[in-house]
Image (cartoon, grey):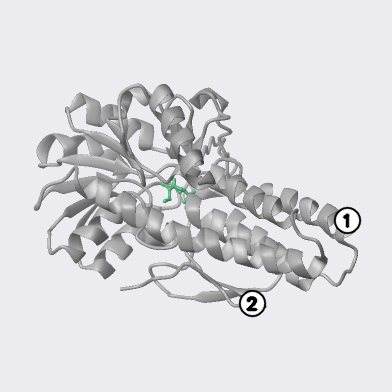
Amino acid sequence: MTIQSVEWKNDAIVILDQQQLPNEIIYEHLTTIEHVWESITYLKVRGAPAIGIVAAFGLALWARSKQSNHLELFLDEFEKQRDYLASSRPTAVNLFWAIDRIVKKVKRAQSVAEAKDLAVAEALAIQKEDVQTCRRIGENGLSLLKDGNTVMTICNAGAIATAKYGTALAPFYLAKEKGLTLKAFACETRPVLQGSRLTAWELQQLGVDVTLITDSMAAHTLKTKEINAVIVGADRIAANGDTANKIGTYGLALLAKAHDIPFYVAAPFSTIDLNTLTGDDIPIEERAAEEITHLQGKAIAPAATKVFNPAFDVTPSELITGIITEYGVVRGDYQTELTRLYSNEIETLQV
Ligand SMILES: CSC[C@@H](O)[C@@H](O)C(=O)COP(=O)(O)O
């Protein structure tokens, strides 16, 4: 099964509208950078790597539509478009990583025509690399599990949140390929239900035995069911290993600790932000009150109820058993290990 969440079509970006799942599979054509901004802000495309990919294509789309022969003016405006897309969501660092990568590449151009080509090529490269990255995350994640294991997860860190395979869900894809069986417990993930709408759906498409629970059932489930590991995705990992992910992840990490169950974060290197020193420095997005007060347009709280709606929380690194990356599983002193791995990666890229 191949579900592609973002596809480049030269004059448009085709996205799978994740807000419509699981009831309808609707592909939407984005033809302007404003459409791209909206698709990110309103969660049609969501999940850190997928946000980065669609934003990269968004810049390429803008570049291609621009009639100009003046390179300097073009680049000035290009950076403004970068800032515009950067304002779509604040927490997932992959967004900034991807658009900054495009800007850096485009600045090498000698002409506007070359700049346009470079933007498209770099966006396609980001998407292509993510396929391999997620596959390696899947292999490394699977090495921590045994045939027949059951994994609990929250939100959706699956194929539709990336170019392919996902991060936290990547071991399920690799297990399928190898004829191994993994089972899942998916937390529904209030308030916008990425767990029930997206993860339960995606794992069902893959033929995985998935059981849906509400977030408040996690403690009881960890206590009474045989859960071998909790694996979650990440939106930003600080230099010390503190990890921002979907709201509820921190609670799950505390519960995993209390029940002596390993708690893993699965994420590509593009989610690690060494410029953010600790979790306290990660900007946490707060979203509209209606996400909590309403369900499918219907009020489920009294009018004008005061609401706090943080979309993410930060799990302190000491609660994390290991960070599953494309380069292996990072454990222990995250500060030292992440920096070491990062410099090795940079060296590898420079060769
Ligand atoms: C591979 S996706 C990793 C994370 O981005 C994911 O776990 C998550 O928290 C997504 O939140 P969302 O608000 O749905 O974009």
Work out whether 99 lies above or below 286: below
Please state the horizontal and vertical placement of residue 82, each as a whole percent of the image.
Answer: 72, 52
Name the secondary structure under disc 2: loop
Name the residue located 17 percent from the left edge and 37 percent from the top edge.
Answer: 222
Residue 10 — which label? Answer: 2
Q: Quadrant of the N terminus?
A: bottom left
Confirm if mark 2 falls within 8 A of ligand 1.
Answer: no
Q: How far is the residue under mark 2 from the one under mark 1? A: 24 Å
Which residue is found at the position 9% from the left and 52% from the top?
Answer: 148
Amino acid carrying mark 2 in the image: Asn
> Is any part of residue 57 visible from this angle?
yes
Asked if residue 212 lies left or right of residue 60, the reply is: left
Taking 232 as reference, is 257 left or right? left
> If you read the primary sequence from the N terminus, does the residue marked by circle 2 or circle 1 appear first?
2
Q: Position of residue 234 (x, y in %)?
A: 42, 42
Determine whether 90 is above or below 334 in the image.
below
Q: Is residue 107 left or right of residue 135?
A: right
Q: Which residue is mark 1?
A: 72
Q: Residues within 10 Å of mark 1 (few under 14, many from 20)?
A: few
SS category of the residue bearing label 1: helix
